[in-house]
Amino acid sequence: MSVLIKNGRIITASDDYIADIFIEGESISAIGKNLSMKADTEIDATGKLVFPGGIDPHVHLDMPFMGTFSSDSYETGTRAALYGGTTMVIDFVLQTQGKSLQHALTDWKSRSDNNCVGDYSFHMAVTDFNDETKKEIKHFIEQEGIVSFKTFMAYKGALMIDDRQMIGLMEEVKKCGGLINVHATNGDMIDYLVAKHRAEGKLSPLYHYLSQPEITEAEASERFVDMASYTGCPGYIVHLTCEGALNAVRNATKRNQKMFVETCIQYLVLDASLYEKDFEGAKWVMSPPLREKKDQATLWAGINQGLVQVVATDHCPFKWEQKLMGKNDFSKIPNGHPAIENRMELLYSEGVVKEKITLNKYVEVTSTNAAKIFGMYPRKGTLAPGSDADIVIFDPNEKHVLSAATHHMNVDYSGYEGREVTGKVKTVLLRGKVVVDDNKCLVEKGYGQFIKRRKVSQII
Ligand code: URP
Ligand code: ZN
Ligand code: ZN
């Protein structure tokens, strides 16, 4: 099968020009002006933006968490991602403490195999680093194509590792050519504040926010970058939200450390005033919580300074009845927020249209940098001959309103209900196939492939 996309405005992380793209099979075979090849399908992209399919490297699909499962399956989550212009996601396998990494991978594959509509990969979350786990790292990097290892500095008793384990894991991952991702918040401090608020009868969602002040994230980020500096292990801080934490990374960059930063769309466009809405605030109970306007300004600046390389979602949806598990106690509200479908359009509307970032930066933070950091570039993350034909055709002017009534995520509310955005995903191709067109998904579960990734020791 071949596809010719005519006259689109092609945007990559570095370029911006009008041309045609010719696709044969799953990959791009030529880009140029007035291409004359005959194709099975021709798409007129005049007046449209044409950019690489989004990569969201932080999602939690069908994940067991806080006594329930996140409500999007691999099918519904990756389909919603495609509707929103994200052609690939990276999800997290969580090791059960006391069991092997391989055991967890087998468990996760039982839910994901043959169920994805879009492409996907996994990070491996190490929650119990010991002599046995240590032996598995090399195998994951070299055989499984899973090169990034997630660590939690919070969620004690379930996911958190201590600094001794962190250092050991960093040394092994560095030796084998991988990368450590981190949820960097001080778990002990948070647990103390949660217990204090509960003891005082302060039980509304607002106290979720007040139990995780900025210092809990700044301190853990500082500690993480220092341990990474000591071991020489490349690091990636997930869902960074605030000025204090970003300043810790600023210091790391002065030491020329390989330290990458992800923020998420919600931290750029929503703020902590939403926790004042009584229990409705549960919609935005996530960790870390939403922050202040000054933190949003820091994050936008961090993107333009090159300190923040990725805008992801941390998509971890729970239906309203699941959120109600914490009706009388904020600490029982499942943590997470749905955004997998909204990220690309929200960032375009809030970032590019409002002139906070350029179009090239938009592509860099939604796709290219994730592909580079996580060992998939240039197969993914750009538009070039030889790359997978993962392509979004985007109307930069169409306005529409985000709503649970029209979204495709398996969750009965939207964190962005009623918000008007400018810019709409019109057509999406994944590995050369038109998978979304005119608000319809044209492929079934099973089309999405597991993407094995390369060692990341050569990262940007
Ligand atoms: O609230 C969140 N972020 N839920 C998902 C788990 C995590 O910490 O990323
Ligand atoms: Zn996290
Ligand atoms: Zn997460």
Image (cartoon, rainbow, N blue to C red):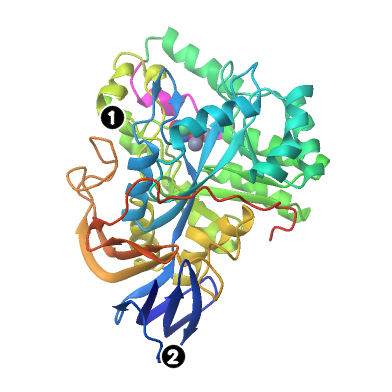
Q: Compared with residue 452, is residue 113 higher up or lower down, i.e. above or below?
A: above
Pick out the residue farthest to the left. 405
Which residues fall within the magenta stretch? 203-215
Whether 428 is among the magenta residues is no
For residue 105, side relative to residue 276 (left or right): right
Q: Residues within 10 Å of mark 2 (few under 14, many from 20)?
A: few
Residue type, label 1: Lys
Q: Disc 1 on helix, strand or loop?
A: loop
User: Residue 450: horizontal and vertical position, in percent?
Assistant: 52, 47
Residue that mark 2 sits on: 33
User: In front: mark 2 or mark 1?
Assistant: 2
Marks 2 and 1, how far apart at CA = 48 Å
What x and y, as percent, mark residue 333? 37, 22
Which of 268/232 is in front? 232
Q: Which residue is mark 1?
A: 319
Asked if one can make out residue 76 in the rendered structure from this viewpoint, the answer is yes
